Amino acid sequence: MEKNPYYCFDEIEKQRKALANNRSQTHLPDVGAGTLATAARTGLKRARLDQVLFRMCVRYKFNNVLEIGNTSGITTLYLLAAGSKMNCVCACNTLPEITRSQPDIGGRKNVRLETIASNADLAILLESVSNPDLIVISGSSQPNQIADYFGQCVNFIHSNSIIVIDAPYRQAESARVWTDIKHHPQVKASIDLYHWGVVFFDPAFANRHFRVLF
């Protein structure tokens, strides 16, 4: 339970609950036919994780955020609520229609929803994103995809950027990818929250790696 919730938390959580109970039918390339609720669960994070992202953006005054992988739109709402100057790009491979249907997302000028079908698509997208402050890579992606996404993203970050790897222990191969990411030569520090892996690139950090019970 969030001890000091921001005003926006309750409203966003109402939308999470509504999405999780949405029985409308849809068809997604990686999932097949099913309800929006079933499909969206592949992109839903725990509320407290989304709220940490929100606080991270507020604390560091991030303005440019990139989400990569399946997204339900709930995390996007938290990111948008973190600041009036926030610009968010969602690079989805299966859930753009769900994200677009979320209230306060569809039609907003500071949100771009892109479908990526290949590494080439992501490379083109990264070229168009101005120095992302925060990149969130969804754990619903396959381990080899996560490795490829990270490998491309590190070519476009700045020293104060942060990359979050969702669900680094989802599979044994995911854990191996997370280990490789922590030891990437550009990574200067990492925090392992089990449900998340967070990496930093600031040269001022002394190559420290932490594990935190969260």
Image: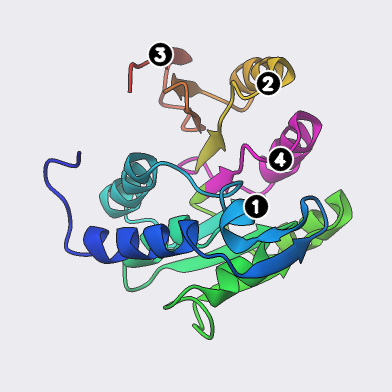
Q: Is residue 170 left or right of residue 9?
A: right
Dot 4: few (<14), some (14–19), or many (≥20) neighbours within 10 Å? many
Q: Nearer the viewer, residue 133 or 37?
A: 37
Mark 2 / mark 1, whichever is N-terminal: 1
Residue at disc 1, secondary structure: loop
Q: CA distance from mark 4 to mark 1?
A: 7 Å
Label pair 4/1, CB-CB below 8 angstroms: yes
Q: CA distance from mark 3 to mark 4?
A: 23 Å
Could you say which quadrant of the image residue 74 lies in? Answer: bottom left
Q: CA distance from mark 2 to mark 1?
A: 17 Å
Residue at which label 2 appears:
171
Mark 4 / mark 1, whichever is N-terminal: 1
Residue occupying image coordinates x 31% and y 47%? 51
Label pair 2/1, CB-CB below 8 angstroms: no
Residue occupying image coordinates x 23% and y 60%? 10
Residue at which label 1 appears:
70
Q: Is residue 128 visible?
A: no
Q: Amino acid at mark 3?
A: Arg
Residue at which label 4 appears:
141
Dot 3: few (<14), some (14–19), or many (≥20) neighbours within 10 Å? few
Segment colored magenta: 135-161
Residue at disc 4, secondary structure: loop
The x and y percentages for residue 196 are 48, 30
Could you say which quadrant of the image residue 12 lies in? Answer: bottom left
Residue at which label 3 appears:
211
Q: CA distance from mark 3 to mark 1?
A: 26 Å
Mark 3 / mark 2, whichever is N-terminal: 2
